[in-house]
């Protein structure tokens, strides 16, 4: 039987914030949680919830106002700077001040806790640097100067540097902030693999909620109203915690898939006929809702008196879209955008004003 994850970091009644001129500014109050070895934990919450402050406190960059952080078997405050350099590596969002160094040189800085005063790289250090460049996917950039890179490329360099530091704990503040969608997913998956394969504790703050719910082992939810809630992402979906923290008017959270969708304001309805389990049917319905039109399968579902029972969009098995108006085929097309262009004039002549009314929105005067 596999062993339970080892507890590496414990927060005991931790209060984070800032102390200035004898006055405390509290950001998060009396937090209790645990980070485990071999797990990737994602810290989620709205802007201003205190995610960056908590991460900086965990990394030892600023002291807690109250409570303590236990790392291993002793308080974080009892570690010296050299010990911390071999214990925790950190990636922050601001890396724009590094100039006139190559990517390889910056990643090699991660080896400084092991290279001594002169920073001389030995064979092992060079191999670690090369491997980290390869893992993060920036080997081709290793001779480029930092100021020539995009924001996303610089972020990858800093992540490679943190991995090269070979610490048991890696803390990252918005590591995927500047990456494109495939890059975000690839980076999250890499960090998760590092946690598992190398038995590291990966702790990162992120706004990529749906990515975190798919990949993280543990999720910490933090905001000013509800405090801190922790657990496996599936448990937080099942017990409604995700909705409590993130759901807003006009947004729907699907617990089974862990995804959000938009509840569009609809001002008209149209009958849609076809196999509602097919991709083309679902995509057409999505496009209709985005344009303020509620798709219905029968007149029994109609909510508006103005809905016509003789106007139907029919989706054929060969993925064609036919608009039937009063029993006559008005158009037969293969693109959703073409069917939208037709029904905009056929069904929703006063659509803009209807959507404004439904959303309580008026035009600028």
Image (tube, rainbow, N blue to C red):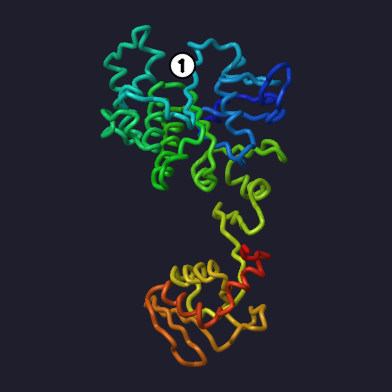
Q: Nearer the viewer, residue 266 or 271?
A: 266
Residue 100 location, quadrant = top left
Q: Nearer the viewer, residue 153 or 280?
A: 153
User: What residue is shown at x 39% (from left), y 83% (from top)?
Assistant: 332
User: What residue is shown at x 39% (from left), y 20% (from top)?
Assistant: 110
Answer yes or no: is residue 1 visible: no
Looking at the picture, does residue 338 appear above or below residue 1?
below
Could you tell me how many numbered marks the image carries? 1
Answer yes or no: is residue 103 visible: yes
Looking at the picture, does residue 209 appear above or below residue 43?
below
- Callout 1 crowding tier (Cα within 10 Å): few <14, some 14–19, many ≥20: some
Quadrant occupied by the C terminus: bottom right
Q: Nearer the viewer, residue 47 or 135?
A: 47
Q: Nearer the viewer, residue 318 or 224?
A: 224
| Residue that carries the numbered disc 1 in the rendered image | 86
User: What residue is shown at x 58% (from left), y 75% (from top)?
Assistant: 351
User: What residue is shown at x 34% (from left), y 20% (from top)?
Assistant: 108
Report the side of 214 relative to 231 (left or right). Answer: left
- The picture places residue 211, in percent across and down from the top left corner, at 50, 46
- The picture places residue 88, in percent across and down from the top left corner, at 49, 21
- The picture places residue 277, in percent across and down from the top left corner, at 49, 70
Report the side of 348 relative to 27 (left or right). Answer: left
Under tag 1, what secondary structure?
Answer: helix
């Amino acid at each position: 039987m596999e062993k339970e994850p080892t507890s590496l970091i414990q927060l005991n009644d931790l209060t984070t914030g800032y102390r200035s001129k004898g006055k405390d500014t509290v950001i998060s109050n009396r937090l209790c949680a645990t980070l485990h070895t071999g797990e990737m934990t994602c810290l989620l919450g709205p802007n201003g919830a205190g995610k960056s402050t908590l991460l900086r406190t965990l990394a030892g960059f600023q002291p807690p106002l109250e409570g303590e952080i236990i790392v291993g078997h002793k308080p974080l405050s009892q570690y010296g700077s050299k010990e911390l350099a071999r214990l925790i590596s950190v990636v922050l969002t601001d890396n724009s001040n590094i100039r006139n160094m190559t990517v390889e040189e910056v990643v090699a800085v991660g080896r400084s806790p092991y290279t001594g005063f002169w920073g001389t790289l030995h064979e092992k250090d060079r191999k670690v640097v090369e491997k980290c460049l390869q893992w993060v996917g920036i080997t081709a950039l290793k001779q480029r100067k930092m100021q020539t890179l995009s924001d996303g490329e610089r972020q990858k360099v800093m992540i490679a540097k943190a991995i090269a530091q070979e610490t048991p704990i890696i803390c990252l503040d918005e590591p995927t902030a500047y990456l494109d969608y495939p890059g975000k997913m690839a980076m999250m998956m890499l960090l998760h693999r590092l946690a598992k394969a190398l038995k590291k504790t990966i702790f990162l703050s992120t706004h990529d909620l749906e990515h975190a719910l798919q990949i993280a082992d543990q999720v910490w939810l933090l905001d000013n109203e509800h405090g801190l809630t922790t657990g496996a992402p599936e448990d937080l979906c099942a017990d409604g915690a995700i909705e409590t923290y993130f759901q807003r008017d006009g947004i729907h959270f699907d617990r089974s898939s862990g995804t959000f969708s938009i509840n569009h304001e609809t001002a008209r309805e149209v009958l849609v006929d076809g196999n509602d389990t097919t991709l083309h049917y679902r995509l057409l319905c999505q496009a209709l809702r985005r344009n303020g039109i509620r798709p219905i399968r029968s007149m029994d579902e109609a909510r508006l008196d103005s809905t016509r029972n003789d106007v139907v969009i029919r989706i054929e098995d060969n993925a064609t879209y036919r608009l039937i108006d009063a029993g006559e085929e008005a158009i037969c097309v293969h693109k959703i955008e073409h069917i939208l262009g037709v029904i905009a004039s056929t069904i929703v002549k006063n659509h803009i004003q209807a959507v404004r009314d439904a959303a309580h929105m008026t035009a600028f005067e």
